[in-house]
Image (cartoon, rainbow, N blue to C red):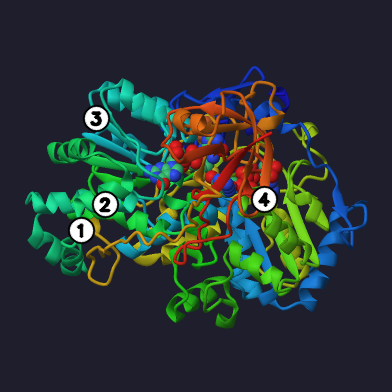
Amino acid sequence: MINNLKKYLFKNRKLITSCTYCGVGCKLELHQNRLKGNKEYCINQGKHCLKGITLLEVQSKNRLKEVLFRKNLNENVQKSNLEFVIKYIANKIKKSDPKRIVFYSAGQVLIEDYYIANKLFKGNLGTANIDSNSRTCIASSVVGLKQVFGVDYIPAQMKEVLETDLILVIGANPAHGHIVFFEKYIKQAVKNGIKIVVVDPFCSKTAEFALKNDGLYLQINVGTDVNLLNAIAKRLLDDKFLDVSYIEEELNGGSEYLKQLKNIDIDEELKKCKISTEEFNELVSLIKKYPKMISIWSMGINQSSEGVEKNFAILNLHLILKRFGESGNNPFPLTGQTNARGGRDVGALATMLAIHKDFDNQSRKELASFWNVPITNIPSKKGYTILEMIEAAQRQEIDIMFIMHTDPVYSLPNRNRIEKALKNIPLVVEVNAYENTLTSKFAHIRVPAKAWGEKYGRQTNMDRHVSYHNKIIDDKNIPQNAIEDWKFLCLLAKELGFDGFDYKDSDEIYKEFQNLTKLSLKGHLNHYDAKINKLKNNKEFYWGKDFFKNYKALTYNQKPNIFFPKNQNLSEKTDKEFPFYMISIRSKNHWNSTAKTSLSSKIKDDLNMVFINENDAKKYNLFQGDKVKIVSKRGFVEDLKIKFSNIKEGVIALYANYPNINYLTPFIYDKKSFQPDYNHTPVKIVRM
Ligand SMILES: Nc1nc2c(c(=O)[nH]1)N[C@H]1C(S)=C(S)[C@@H](COP(=O)(O)OP(=O)(O)OC[C@H]3O[C@@H](n4cnc5c(=O)[nH]c(N)nc54)[C@H](O)[C@@H]3O)O[C@H]1N2
Ligand SMILES: Nc1nc2c(c(=O)[nH]1)N[C@H]1C(S)=C(S)[C@@H](COP(=O)(O)OP(=O)(O)OC[C@H]3O[C@@H](n4cnc5c(=O)[nH]c(N)nc54)[C@H](O)[C@@H]3O)O[C@H]1N2
Ligand code: SF4
Ligand SMILES: [Mo]
């Protein structure tokens, strides 16, 4: 394979590309037809996880190879070709109204793919109806950061855990979700004597690690993180540990925040969290003892009807303690997918324009002039977020839906409702590299995409590092009809008669994006400083390097805003019929829908499990290995096995990777971030 790929070799004679799974963004190299971690790349320095190195094995299996077409869902699909479907789709678009056209993608497409989608929709079609599965993932953090710091900027980086004193992991399990971050950075930090605290209703592998290494594990009740974090802030205030005049003068809203904080009754809050006073005191004393702190959070916080409030609560701790903007002293919400950061930067969310811009006239003017289009082409208000797209489809207000690199029938909440809504859309176009999606049943047109290792482009990892995705698969091993995601969109744009979509290659697209970033607020998104050749040669570049040196925030007065968060209990509640809260957790070796990881002979994690506290199991006469059915108000799943584990009583966990999980979850979302409430589903267990 390597011989035919000489022209793609890096200067150092190695075939290197990036992993396209998680937010760590490792580089992998091909060595005698096997993948291993690349030693020279700054992030993983030779490390990798099993998922990453099985990318090569799964690249060629079960691929979607032909363009497929049918007019109606009750017909069988027919082999078609790109020319025909592009014309067909363009025709339908011309007959429709941009308000009735939507595009849904993922944090795994490359920067160039996302950029073109954004330019087509928000620059030419004139609609902001383009959203990403990042909505299901980090939307609550995006809103939290934007409201507090005035911009969607995550100040921390992975290496900072080595420079801190205290690592607070709350609602995240990096031992499974961000394996190289955990293995290479967190473990090393703890080995160096840095303290780790884990707050989670489920004793995850990260929590087990904390317990084994002189750390602290707090088994919090589901959905009560705001209560805990407010209680911590109140105790710090009571103990005169906080610089009150700093909070009042240097944080916008500081006085109001303090006023509300004073009403907090610590004992009441701890009761809701089901955390003992001793455990609480221990956590507070660690926070007091150590001046530097990195807080790490992810889906246990974000996937909630109150995800933004929870983000505020964590950010507040950093604000009131002045623990931000310094290496080793920062909040660090983890990004799930490899290019979710890059997607947000080009404008993949329906709630923002490109390069973190809002829908104000000045921003619209700048973008219109950059793309050389009339200002009326640039939307003046947010578009449909994904669950709003589904609601609109239910009202029969959507004509065309594009789905690229994601499997919404698997991943969106309340699957029965999603399936019904998709059936209402007259034209669903799915662009996917693999055959086995659950969404394909609802698609009229299916376009085969080039997959990992078959294309070029760039992606931005969770600490803002931009890496080059290199082609390392020989042409003869790439399905002939497969096309780059961006190329498909360019062909469509050209068929629609739009100018500015004639790109020679992905470098040309990236250069255009680099130029666009010069228009970002105070130039903070400085991709324009990246050198394409250096990126191609494995060199490090991350945007926003000196952000905090120059600004504390990008608010009107450069001071961060502080908001007092409340737990309003907006999720569905358990009751006699549905007595357990179901949460979802990630398996170590499967990736999301398992579209790719299920094809690997090396990945065998059993996903059919219900994790339950033994005391709860006893109450219901359930034993290890018993086969059960899990039922919620919306549906049920069968053939799961009981597994006793260290999990809060009243809570059960299923794998998020279990393909049918979303038959159970509710169609509820945070009204500020539009992120679904996956983690608080009332369910019952029925023995089979
Ligand atoms: N191996 C593997 N890695 C992955 C993925 C994968 O599928 N497999 N997916 C990737 C993606 S897209 C993402 S978004 C990330 C997700 O990464 P993580 O968010 O770290 O992973 P999860 O296991 O979904 O959830 C984290 C923890 O939140 C806890 N939790 C649930 N409810 C609450 C609560 O109310 N409060 C608190 N404090 N904790 C709670 C759960 O028990 C769980 O341990 O992982 C990425 N990496
Ligand atoms: N209950 C519950 N539901 C959840 C979650 C949860 O924790 N609990 N987590 C949510 C989160 S955080 C996320 S991020 C989502 C993830 O949910 P999805 O986005 O639906 O899952 P993935 O498996 O990441 O989807 C990737 C798709 O891209 C396809 N693909 C692979 N390579 C290529 C390519 O190069 N081009 C194209 N066009 N396609 C390709 C794969 O075949 C696959 O269908 O799930 C969400 N849903
Ligand atoms: S840690 Fe993440 S980026 Fe690194 S190899 Fe594993 S899945 Fe890929
Ligand atoms: Mo995610």
Give coordinates of residue 455: x percent, y percent. Answer: 66, 42
Identify the element where label 2 is drawn: helix
Structural distance between the alpha carbons of marks 2 and 4: 33 Å
Which residue, given by chain and number where applicable, does mark 3 sit on? 195
Which residue, given by chain and number where applicable, does mark 4 sit on? 635
What mark, if any, has residue 269 been given in the picture? 2
- Within-10-Å neighbours for mark 1: few <14, some 14–19, many 20+: some
Q: Nearer the viewer, mark 3 or mark 4?
A: 4
Q: Earlier in the sequence, mark 1 or mark 2?
A: 1
What mark, if any, has residue 464 been given in the picture? none
Q: Residue at x 36, y 54 (%)?
A: 310
Discs 1, 2 touching: Cβ within 8 Å: yes
Discs 3, 1 touching: Cβ within 8 Å: no
Structural distance between the alpha carbons of marks 4 and 1: 39 Å
Q: Splitting the image into 4 quarters, where does residue 630 fall?
A: top right
Q: Earlier in the sequence, mark 2 or mark 4?
A: 2
- Given the image, on which type of amino acid does mark 2 rest? Glu
Discs 3, 2 touching: Cβ within 8 Å: no
Structural distance between the alpha carbons of marks 3 and 4: 43 Å
Structural distance between the alpha carbons of marks 3 and 1: 28 Å
- Given the image, on which type of amino acid does mark 3 rest? Lys
Taking 306 as reference, is 132 left or right?
Answer: right
Quadrant housing the N terminus: top right
- Given the image, on which type of amino acid does mark 4 rest? Gly
Which residue, given by chain and number where applicable, does mark 1 sit on? 264
Is residue 533 in view?
A: no
Q: Earlier in the sequence, mark 3 or mark 2?
A: 3
